[in-house]
Every structure is written in C-alpha cells, then in structure tokens.
Amino acid sequence: MKIIMLGAPGAGKGTQAKKIAEKYQIPHISTGDIFRANIKNGTELGKKAKTYMDQGLLVPDELVVDLVVDRVGQEDCTKGYVLDGFPRTIPQAEALDKALAELGQKMDFAVDVEVPDENIINRMSGRRACVGCGATYHLVYAPTKMENVCDNCGGELVLRDDDKPETVKKRLDVYHEQTQPLIEYYTNSGILKTVDGTADIGDVFAEIVGILGA
Ligand code: ADP
Ligand code: AMP
C-alpha cells in the first residue's frame, strides 16, 4: 500500500504516518526527518536544506525529488510505504507519478489531514522534538512520561527552530500557496481521502484505518 500524507505543517501527518507504518508494517518516509538527519550529520545536503528550512521556505524541488525516488526504489519499499511531507509542490507530485509509472506502479491513497490555520500555531508551539531520535511529542496532546525526556531514547526535547510562531506563519503561507494545490491534483487522480485532523490522535487514526482497510 502506497500512501501520501497531505496537510498543513502541524496537522498531524507525522503522528499518523508513524501509526500507519507500524500497523501496516511499511516504511515511514519523512523528507523533513531526512533533512534534519542531514543537518545533524553536517552533510552538504543538510547545509543547503537548512538555509531554506530556517526561513520557513521549501527546499528546492531538485534537492528533494531524486532523494525520494531513490528511497522508494529500495528493497524495504516493495510492499509499500507512507510518504510524510512529500510531495509538497505540483512538480514534485508530477515527478513522483512519472517515476512510479516507469516502474508500472502508482500511489493508492493521498490522505489529507484537515486542520484549520487557527489550530496550527497552538499545535506547533506545543510540539517538542527529541534531539536524539527525532520522536515528536506535544506538551498537552501527546506528553512524554517524564517531563522533557524522550520516551524512546531518553534524549532531550526541544522546540524546533522552525516551530517558532513567526516561522510557522510563513510555513502556513507557503503551504497554502505551494502545497494546497495538491488537494485538487489528487482529487483529479481519484485517490484523495480527507480526514478531520482536529479530532483526538486515536480518532484520526481510526478514521484513516477505516479508509485504508484493516
Ligand atoms: P506534521 O507532521 O503534520 O507537521 P505532527 O504529527 O508533528 O505534524 O503534529 C504536530 C503537533 O501536534 C505534535 O506536537 C503532535 O504531537 C500534535 N498532534 C498531532 N495530532 C494531533 C491531534 N489529533 N490532536 C492534538 N495534537 C496533535
Ligand atoms: P516537515 O518536518 O515535514 O515539517 O519539514 C520541515 C521542513 O523541511 C519544511 O518546512 C521544508 O523546509 C523542508 N521540506 C520537507 N519536505 C520537503 C519537500 N517535500 N519539499 C521541499 N521542502 C521540504
């Protein structure tokens, strides 16, 4: 099963993608996580990506597309995968469709997690990410067992630089301008499914499982 998660920054794509990956035993591919790992490791790609990410802008398509096309061609993706944070522009979606078509494949579902802009700033200001393993929590909605300590690896939790309110506003503008047109793109290709992302994490997941099948 090949799934794309769509939605504004902070809508809950990563939260739901992890649950989908676990339930259906498929890889979770997050381009944001890939860039953050590159930044942490000081790679050339990480250095280039950081200049855009810090400003709330998208990384240029040419730095993202090949990376994802390579990743979905790997052995562990033969049963499917869940893409989180990609595609984010129409050219990325077209490049993905083209690469899959060459392999005789296509995406099965694009799940749009809908959350109004008013809720997003609140979501993002409470999001905490682990500096060690990248796991994501929320101070109120998905707290850790011990304050400021990652449940997974014991690492320290921080507010991501790009989750500060000024940057979140820019990311929302960029989302509406460059990513939202994908809703129409996947409606036209017949694979768009919309879920209410304002519900509790478990209820959103139940709605997604209802769509994907048990
Ligand atoms: P995205 O991957 O779309 O940027 P995340 O999955 O990281 O978003 O979620 C953003 C923040 O909101 C995180 O702190 C997460 O714990 C929290 N969150 C996710 N889904 C919900 C939900 N349904 N209700 C409340 N908080 C949520
Ligand atoms: P995310 O963790 O998905 O919120 O992504 C964090 C940041 O990484 C985004 O604000 C972008 O700067 C960059 N990014 C992640 N995925 C993409 C993509 N598909 N295209 C362009 N930029 C991306």
Image (cartoon, helix red, strand yellow):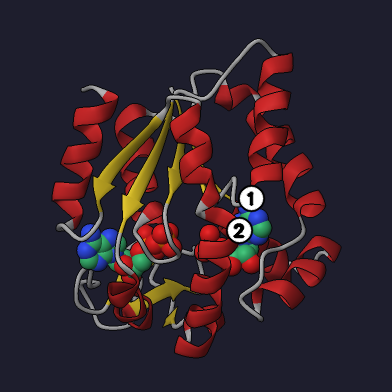
Pick the front one: 11 or 178: 178
Specify whether 109 is left or right of 60: left
Which residue matches tag 1? 89
Determine whether 112 is above or below 51 in the image: above
Establish if 203 lies above or below 213.
below
Q: Nearer the viewer, residue 72 or 173?
A: 173
Q: Quadrant of ligand 1?
A: bottom left
Residue under circle 2? 178
Which picture quadrant has residue 74? top right
Residue 188 seen in render: yes
Q: Quadrant of residue 54?
A: bottom right
Instruction: Residue type at mark 1: give it.
Output: Thr
Could you say where residue 161 lies in the image, as x and y percent from the top left? 55, 83
Q: Amino acid at mark 2?
A: Gln
| Vertical side of 91 occupied by 170: above or below | below
Q: Looking at the picture, how far across and down is residue 5, in whole percent?
A: 44, 44
Q: Nearer the viewer, residue 60 or 162?
A: 60
Spot occupied by residue 29 in the image (x, y as percentages of width and height): 54, 43
- Which type of secondary structure does the marked residue at label 2 adopt? helix
Picture residue at 76% right of the left edge, 52% below the top: 61
The verdict on label 1 being within 8 Å of ligand 2 is yes
